[in-house]
Amino acid sequence: MSKKKTCMTVIENRAIAEGIYSMVLVCPEGESFGAVRPGQFVGVCCRDGSRILPRPISICDFDAEGKLLRLVYRCAGKGTAEFAGWEAGSEAQILGILGNGYDLSALVGKKVLLIGGGIGAPPLLGLAKSLKQADEAAGAGKVTAVLGYRTNDLFLAEEFRRAAEVIIATDDGSAGVHGNVIDAIRELSPEFDVICACGPMPMLRGVKALAEEKGVKAWISLEERMACGVGVCLGCVTKTAHKDEHSNVNNTRICTEGPVFDAEEVLL
Amino acid sequence: MTQSQMTEKNRPDMSVEIAGVRFQNPVMTASGTFGSGIEYSEFVDLNRLGAVVTKGVSNIPWEGNATPRVSETWGGMLNAIGLQNPGIDIFVERDLKFLEPYDTKVIVNVCGKSEQDYLDVVERLSDEKRVDMLEINVSCPNVKEGAIAFGVHADSLFRITEKIKKVAKQPVIMKLTPNVTSIPELARAAEAGGADALSLINTITGMKIDVERRCFVLANRTGGLSGPAIHPVAVRMVYEAAHSVKIPVIGMGGIATAEDALEMILAGASGVAVGAMNFSDPMTTIRVIEGIEAYMERHQVSKITDLIGVL
């Protein structure tokens, strides 16, 4: 029995943009999650018992020992609205660490293009930081982050700049390239030989097409409504190109085999 | 006498017998909420459970429904998974093999689209020593063919029960749907067909609409409601079933606490199963077991069987 619900303590919880919050949690004294991979997520349990399902929230950042987790989330419904009101010093029941995360060994030393759309950007920040550290140790590699926003409320962009070259795209043209992340990539032609992306489905379809066109690998992080978050309920499946080993059909569990997939392996 | 022997001696007897099968305690997992225990074994010591009841398995792999398949509702959730499962071959090779070393009973939930589908799975499992009982899913509201179609009419339920009993080597539990007018009528039909036990309730058919987008939340439009919101309905139906038949009844539907489980037991359930609340807290089964023990100590009940159906 290696997993359990962990009673973490909220250290900080604040709005960083309109409807976007950043929450930092710490494990109880003497406990830790060990090695966390960028792209993994946790189930955050509501305190209100009428909301029974843990909310899957991606891990934005973490420390080396896995004692600290930073979650950046959008206030999208009743559960996340509850989280937004949690005060520093209060407790949070956390299920996890969940999911596969990005495989750093496939990315270190390469020219990596991170593509984050809106609330898809947070997990890529942890990835950018991990890659920067690993690239420096390897003496090779370059990370460029393309971040798409609706307006010039550019949450996390400054933090990305400390770990990567940053390209901004905004829907309203108020900052960076006027258009979406794919428009920005076409306009500014950053060099890359592998893509990691997280964002809304139309963006991921664009990323998959871009990767096919350029002949590069794309690792994309998918989202779906989940119940258990651990691979039991089969609520969060996505269609696959090949028969999935676990399900024995062309369906795979986003929470367990994902959320990060080789774009070629999933049908979007 | 040492303290540990004292404790052991004074511990309440939690064991129950259902259709000749002895369970170390009455607490099981509800089908579809625990897989085959592989994933939750990282959270829960399966050896402490009365039984692992597996997710429904069919003769061939099933893809299930389109997504979204789940949605939370007040005090519960809707699901329309559509019985996605890898099929009986993988199930036997992987899932049953995984359960082999555990000191818990194994109840395999069987689903099908046609009568023959059910019979294929039941026959296939007849030589599997690890399978202690079969639970026949004639009550899933989320698949177009089979399943619930067999479970809403007394005559069809009677017929399929009779046919399954002819080929089954393990005791057979018929799992009933709440989406009927008369639980006693269905309970008696299954008993007349030769069922060794009943389990209920499966989920209650529901619907959720996204008013902002003006669309159905689930791709399947309707889904099965489970979780604490349905518990009082389940208690009532368990009570009705238990008072209509002589065979044992296993109660489920929204159990979150020992109190919820005890309500079912007092209403007549010989066993209880935790379902949706596993998702909320994977340790729910263990908390329920410990809570029942504490209740028995507090009320000086030495055998749990003394509580079954006292109302």
Image (tube, grey):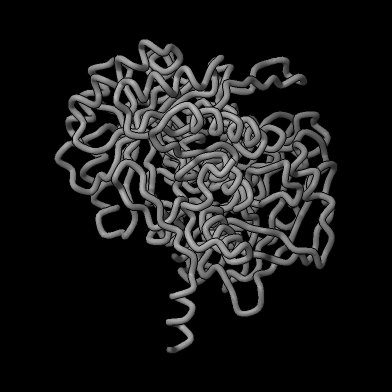
**What percent of the width, then of the height, locates residue B291?**
59, 60
**What percent of the width, then of the height, locates residue A225?**
59, 35
Q: Is residue B259 left or right of residue A98?
A: right
Q: Quadrant of the C terminus of chain B?
A: top right
**Picture quadrant where residue B232 is located:** top right
Please say if A141 is above or below A26: above
Q: Tell me the residue at 41%/13% (across/down).
A: B154
Please indicate, yes or no, whether residue A88 appears anywhere in the rendered image: yes
Q: In front here: A21 or A116? A: A21
Q: Tell me the residue at 77%/21% (across/down).
A: B212
Q: In front here: A147 or B58? A: B58
Q: Quadrant of the N terminus of chain B?
A: bottom left
Q: Tell me the residue at 72%/49% (across/down).
A: A46
**Picture quadrant where residue B46 is located:** bottom left
Residue at the extreme left: B127
**What percent of the width, then of the height, locates residue A131?**
54, 61
**What percent of the width, then of the height, locates residue B234?**
58, 33
